[in-house]
Amino acid sequence: MGNLTNCFQLLLKKVGLNANAKDLNKEIISLEIGNFTYHFKEFPKDHLIIYSLLDNESKVSSDTQLNALNENHFSEQLVQPIFSYDQKNEKFILWNRQSIQLITEQTILDQLEAMVSSTEAIQAKLNKNETDEQLSVPPRGLHTISG
């Protein structure tokens, strides 16, 4: 069994789930939680990366991008997620990484929980941008009311 499979089995054990061994024998293992899919991959060697692509179907304003980038701040959390843009897929991406040698049931759960929390927060900011754009209706003209 590879490093990725071992790490993922630790997570499954921690949350009380089971998976078929052949489902775990892949280069990338995906896990759906709520509206998001989290992908687990060994990258680079001996490091576990978890990433998620965010939904940004509409054009995101630069103010919204800056607001979302505010999530990329220094933190005492070792697996703090990083928000960036994947030009190949034209999607925003959130990812974090830790050394496989340091992974325990608790640290992999902490890594995933950090991702879930940040993904939800950033997606809410991106969705707010869409809502703001839908609510801003440009004026069609001025009408005077005489009384």
Image (cartoon, rainbow, N blue to C red):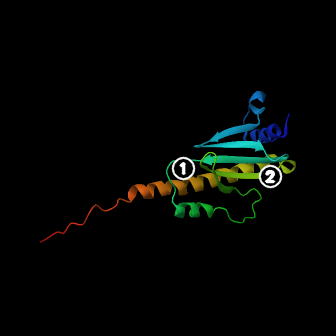
Point out the image quarter for the N terminus.
Answer: top right
Q: Label 1 sits on what residue type? A: Asn
Q: Is residue 124 left or right of residue 38?
A: left
- Where residue 64 sits in the image (x, y, percent)? 53, 61
Residue that extends furthest to the bottom in the rendered view of this protein: 147
Is 113 or 24 nearer to us in this picture? Answer: 24
Q: Which residue is mark 1?
A: 56
Q: Residue at x 43, y 57 (%)?
A: 133
- Please provide percent x and percent y for residue 2: 85, 36
Of badges 2 and 1, nearer the viewer stands 1
Residue situated in front as seen by the camera: 61 or 68: 61
- Asked if residue 28 is positioned above or below residue 93 in the image, the reply reads above
Of 100 and 11, the residue lying toward us:
100
Which residue extends farthest front? 88
Depicted 11 relative to depicted 133: above or below: above
Q: Position of residue 88 (x, y in %)?
A: 64, 46
Q: Quadrant of the C terminus?
A: bottom left
User: Residue at image x 65%, y 55%?
Assistant: 84
> Please, what is the three-letter code of the amino acid marked with disc 2?
Gln
What is the CA distance from the residue labelled 2 to the residue labelled 1?
27 Å
Sequence-first tag of 2 and 1: 1
